Amino acid sequence: MTSAKQDIEPGASAIGVDEIVALYRKYRDDLAVVRNEQRALRAANPALKAQLDDLEAEITYLLIRETRPANMVEIGSLHGWSTNWILRALRDNGMGHLHTYDLIDNARHNVAPELADERWTFVRGDARNELALYDRKIDYLFIDAAHTASFARWFVGDLFPLLRSDVPVSVHDVFHGRRPWPVSEGRVVLSWLADAGLDHFTVSRAAAPRHHRRITGLKDELGLAAPVHTGRHNPMLFFRTA
Ligand SMILES: C[S@@+](CC[C@H](N)C(=O)[O-])C[C@H]1O[C@@H](n2cnc3c(N)ncnc32)[C@H](O)[C@@H]1O
């Protein structure tokens, strides 16, 4: 485990590439272990569909490590690839609980009992209905579900206003290209961020090639270059609430 102290400003700032670089250095050794665990998970489950690409999965892991959320919500788990990344971060923090919402429950079959144990609640159903029953605060919100404008209008309208300040939020499938599609989840999220005066961060190869190159080069330097899985778009958008 790496314990080198890094000069990272916690809290009310936008997520930026320098912060992410510092987090890769700080948690490098733990991340190397988790990458191997995720690789082994895929090897043991060849049918497991993995949607989250490596950089965005790793950044999610790093932000969870640094933020230490007590309560985290994931919307959209599919076969549990992102769920495993998130649960390993909570395990490595030694604290935190994840509530996962999905219409299908395949993820249940792909999370090891010792990882799930007392750390994970899976709720099968439409997040738009089920989250009405969620009665905790959300310290990290991860969204990778229906990529439609109407679904996004639900979460920016009903969920985002409930978040306290300094809460990290991840929204997947925004930046497959330089910009989100005109009528899409990503477009709705970007409009909401603009109205709120908030910046976002991405390492999308198409939308942020310099960030993408910087993190890829850093991973070479840190001995983390070998891919865990093959996706390379990294379309996730990250931001912190004001
Ligand atoms: C892109 S997949 C998630 C991929 C996963 N995060 C990963 O890393 O592999 C999207 C998931 O969102 C779920 N989903 C779609 N609409 C939903 C809704 N309204 N409520 C809950 N889950 C939903 C789908 O069932 C699907 O499993």
Image (cartoon, rainbow, N blue to C red):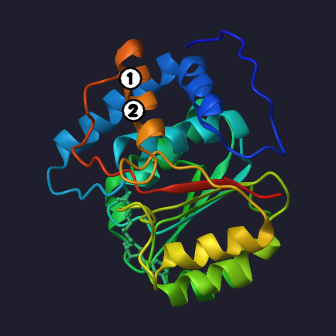
**Quarter of the image where the N terminus is located:** top right
Which residue is at the front of the view, 127 or 57?
A: 57
Q: Position of residue 22 (x, y in %)?
A: 62, 23
Which residue is at the front of the view, 182 or 72?
A: 182
Residues tagged 2 and 1 counted as in contact (Cβ below 8 A): yes
| Ligand 1 neighbours mark 2 (CB distance < 8 Å) | no
Q: Is residue 134 visible?
A: no
Q: Which residue is mark 2?
A: 213
| Ligand 1 neighbours mark 1 (CB distance < 8 Å) | no
For the point 65% across and 11% down, the residue is: 3
Which type of secondary structure does the marked residue at label 2 adopt? helix
Give the Cα distance between marks 2 and 1: 6 Å
For the point 64% across and 79% down, the residue is: 155
Under mark 1, the amino acid is Gly
- Residue 69 numbered mark, or none: none
Quadrant in the rendering for residue 128: bottom right
Q: Which residue is mark 1?
A: 217
For the point 17% across and 40% down, the residue is: 43
Q: Position of residue 60 (x, y in %)?
A: 53, 44
Quadrant in the rendering for residue 156: bottom right
